[in-house]
């Protein structure tokens, strides 16, 4: 059986044609521009998502027409927490406000005052990245536009609307709006009232693995397909977790992407708002996903690569050499807080910091410090999640950051746990989406529990472990002063 998994990331979109949820037939990707119209603002034109997905599917059809004709399901996973508002004709009223937008800081405090227990009912403490504070901000600053708004959409749901013509969402992504009661998976009238949003302007909530529509006939003809089911889908963290084999309590999938996310599968709802932990429904029946977030992971390496003129890949290579031959104690300490801190401090207003600069600091040392800082904060996320009762037993790493062997060893050493790396960790998101597509097209729910092949297991590095024991207090001290 053929299925397609589409992963809608912040900076790019990837579509994968997969046979029997095992063999990758073809892969297509497209970049998507992010707009920053003001300091702290982050937006995207939603129609760019659709155009990029269509371009990817065009390429898959050109590369593998016979296999495309056999496709039975399409699944979508997408960047979470965006605020996209549609008019009565289901057209965007403005660009989508993204997860890393910081404009609604004041509105977070207002929302918490209006709903003091919101962190126990929804996915966490109000944060400017989450959708609900954005609604309050838009009511203040763009009231005429909001008066015309007739539907709230999330990233992958808007793309599915373009594919099928049907409006829907599902609990894993909807939990990020803070309008959904995460324990029950239902829209909450009180939460909607608190932000001034009409419940009639919300999409119906389906199971993540349910069929949420079928591919429009014109699109099916364009890509040489027959009748194709389109799954309700997943938020990107849930899709990646599923694609990496995270389907039962104790599975921990750490994504090292633009942001870093510690996704821990839980058999119960264990909210941790006091530690800025996000908790939403997972895409496997009767499970939840606890998420600790490092706001800038590969984004930190990209920034440092640009500042040093080495580029991210070049700087990672220099850092590898320094870690092998240099004195780690000479490296500065880097706090990966370029777009604030979520877990465990909940300081969205915090800024990044480099401490311990001296004349001998080299780009290689700065690269090492960047990788180390992200690894230490990732370990902080897992510690915070464990402190609220979430189990973490089996660690898997996915995301673009897994291309750095040093980063893998640093994360394993910071955790004090072995970590598995998948054979195709870059495809975890599309693979999770394809699993949902297979079930939506009539496959059994047991497909969601299939585990992918592991390429290698990385144990903690004794040298790095020893170095981190000395450097961890320096990092903790700097974080405490934020």
Image: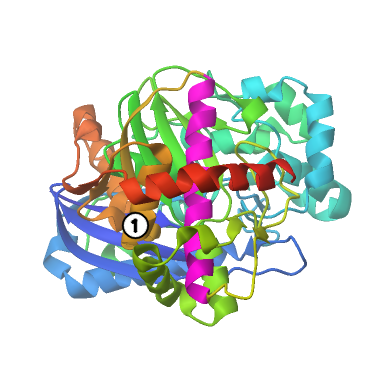
Q: Which residue matches tag 1?
A: 402
The residue segment tinted magenta is: 363-388
Q: Where is 370 relative to 281, above or below? A: below
Regarding residue 16, the answer to whether it shows in the image is yes
Q: Position of residue 12 (x, y in %)?
A: 45, 66
Give the camera-side residue of 331 and 43.
331
Which residue is located at x 38 percent, y 50 percent?
Answer: 464
Query: Could you tell me what secondary structure mostly forms the magenta stretch?
Result: helix
**Residue 396 located left or right of residue 40:** left
Give the camera-side residue of 109 and 448.
109
Which residue is located at x 19 percent, y 49 percent?
Answer: 456
Give the camera-side residue of 482 and 278.
482
Specify the quadrant of the image occupied by residue 418.
top left
Label 1: few (<14), some (14–19) or many (≥20) C-alpha neighbours in 10 Å: some
Which residue is located at x 74 percent, y 36 percent?
Answer: 197
Specify the quadrant of the image occupied by residue 47.
bottom right
Q: How is the image coloured?
A: rainbow
Q: Position of residue 315 (x, y in %)?
A: 45, 73
């Amino acid at each position: 059986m053929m299925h397609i998994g589409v992963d809608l990331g912040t900076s790019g979109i990837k579509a994968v044609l997969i046979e029997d949820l095992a063999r990758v037939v073809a892969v297509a990707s497209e970049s998507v521009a992010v707009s920053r119209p003001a300091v702290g603002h982050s937006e995207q034109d939603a129609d760019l998502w659709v155009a990029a997905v269509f371009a990817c599917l065009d390429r898959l059809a050109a590369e593998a027409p016979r296999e495309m004709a056999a496709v039975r399901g399409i699944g979508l996973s997408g960047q979470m927490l965006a605020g996209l508002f549609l008019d009565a004709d289901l057209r965007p009223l403005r660009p989508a406000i993204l997860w890393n937008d910081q404009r609604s800081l004041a509105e977070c405090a207002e929302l918490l005052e209006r709903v003091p227990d919101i962190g126990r009912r929804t996915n966490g403490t109000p944060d400017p990245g989450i959708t609900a504070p954005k609604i309050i901000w838009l009511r203040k600053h763009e009231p005429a536009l909001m008066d015309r708004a007739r539907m709230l959409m999330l990233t992958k749901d808007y793309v599915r609307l373009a594919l099928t013509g049907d409006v829907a969402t599902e609990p894993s992504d909807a939990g990020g709006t803070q309008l959904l009661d995460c324990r029950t998976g239902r829209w909450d009238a009180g939460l909607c009232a608190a932000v001034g949003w009409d419940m009639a302007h919300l999409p119906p909530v389906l199971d993540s693995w349910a069929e949420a529509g079928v591919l429009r006939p014109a699109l099916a003809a364009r890509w040489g397909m027959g009748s194709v089911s389109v799954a309700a889908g997943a938020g990107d963290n849930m899709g990646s977790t599923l694609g990496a084999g995270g389907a039962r309590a104790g599975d921990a999938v750490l994504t090292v992407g633009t942001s870093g996310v510690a996704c821990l599968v839980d058999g119960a709802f264990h909210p941790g708002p006091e530690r800025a932990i996000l908790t939403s429904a997972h895409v496997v029946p009767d499970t939840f996903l606890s998420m600790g977030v490092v706001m800038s992971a590969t984004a930190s390496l990209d920034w440092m690569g640009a500042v040093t003129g080495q580029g991210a890949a070049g700087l990672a290579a220099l850092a590898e050499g320094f870690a092998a031959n240099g004195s780690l104690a000479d490296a500065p300490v880097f706090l990966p807080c370029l777009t604030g801190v979520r877990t465990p401090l909940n300081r969205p207003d915090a800024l990044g910091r480099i401490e311990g600069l001296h004349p001998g600091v080299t780009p290689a040392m700065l690269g090492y410090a960047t990788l180390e800082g992200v690894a230490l904060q990732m370990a902080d996320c897992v510690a915070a999640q464990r402190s609220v009762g979430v189990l973490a037993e089996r660690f898997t790493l996915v995301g673009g950051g897994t291309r750095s062997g040093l980063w893998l060893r640093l994360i394993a050493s910071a955790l004090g746990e072995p970590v598995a790396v998948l054979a195709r960790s870059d495809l975890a998101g599309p693979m999770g989406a394809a699993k949902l597509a297979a079930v939506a097209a009539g496959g059994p729910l047991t497909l969601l529990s299939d585990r992918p092949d592991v390429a290698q297991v990385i144990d903690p590095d004794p040298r790095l472990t020893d170095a981190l024991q000395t450097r961890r207090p320096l990092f903790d001290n700097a974080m405490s002063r934020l």
